[in-house]
Amino acid sequence: MNGETKYLSLDYGLKRIGVSVSDASKTYAFQRDYFINNEKFLSSLMDLIKSENIIKIIIGRPLRFNSEKTHITDDVDNFSKKLIKKLKNKSIECEVIFFDERLTSSLAQFNLNASGLSKKKRKDKGNIDTISAQIILQDYLDSIKNRK
């Protein structure tokens, strides 16, 4: 593992978790494949965190337009607690933060529809999850750049 660090974002879902990783300059977000949300997920995620030298994880936090919780917000909160505990148990120093993910799935679907991919690939919900994770991470990276 080299000294270059990266950020990772997750679009958490009950069935699938979309994943995106930044470049080392933390300027651009790149899609990764999604994970199936099962008992192997956290171990696979730990492997990815180590191999990509991740120092920050951005988790999309689902909220309604009025900032109230959605049906999945508590699941995301519970997942983040498990993730933080697993990171500590593995002695991995990695900051975990939430970032507003409102409209990312709609934007991801729009991007897929405009992409020219076949109808079958556009309907693959895993593609929406990975694009959503990329949008979350890119929005986060842009927000940091805009604050400077």
Image (spheres, rainbow, N blue to C red):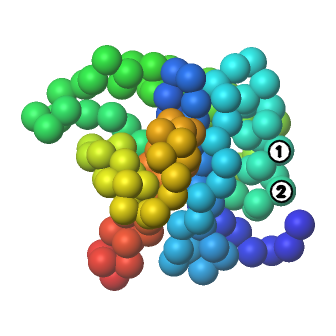
What residue do we see at 73% from left, 30% from top? 42
Q: Examine the rendered structure and indicate whether residue 29 appears above or below residue 54.
A: below
Query: Dot 1, crowdedness within 10 Å: few (<14), some or many (≥20)?
Result: few
- Amino acid found under the numbered disc labelled 1: Asp
Q: Is residue 137 above or below residue 36?
A: below
Q: Rate crowding at label 2 as few (under 14), some (14 to 19) or many (20 or more) other CA atoms within 10 Å.
A: few
Where residue 9 sits in the image (x, y, percent)? 54, 51
- Where is residue 124, by image quadrant? top right
Q: What SS does tag 2 mark?
A: helix
Q: Residue at x 65, y 54 (%)?
A: 32
Residue placed under numbered mark 1 in the picture: 47
Q: Quadrant of the N terminus?
A: bottom right
Tell me if label 1 and label 2 are in contact, CB under 8 Å.
Answer: yes
In the image, is 64 to the left or to the right of 37?
Answer: left
Choose top left, top right, bottom left or bottom right for residue 112. Answer: bottom left
Q: Which secondary structure, mark 1? A: helix
Horizontally, residue 92 falls left or right of residue 95, namely right
Residue found at the far right of this picture: 1
Q: Amino acid at mark 2?
A: Ser
For the C terminus, the image quarter is: bottom left
Residue highlighted by disc 2:
51
Asked whether 60 or 131 is in front, the reply is 131
Q: 117 or 48, which lies in front?
A: 117
The percent position of residue 132, horizontal first and vertical second, equals 44, 49
126 up-or-down from 21: above or below? above
Q: Looking at the image, which residue is at 37% across and 48% down?
A: 109
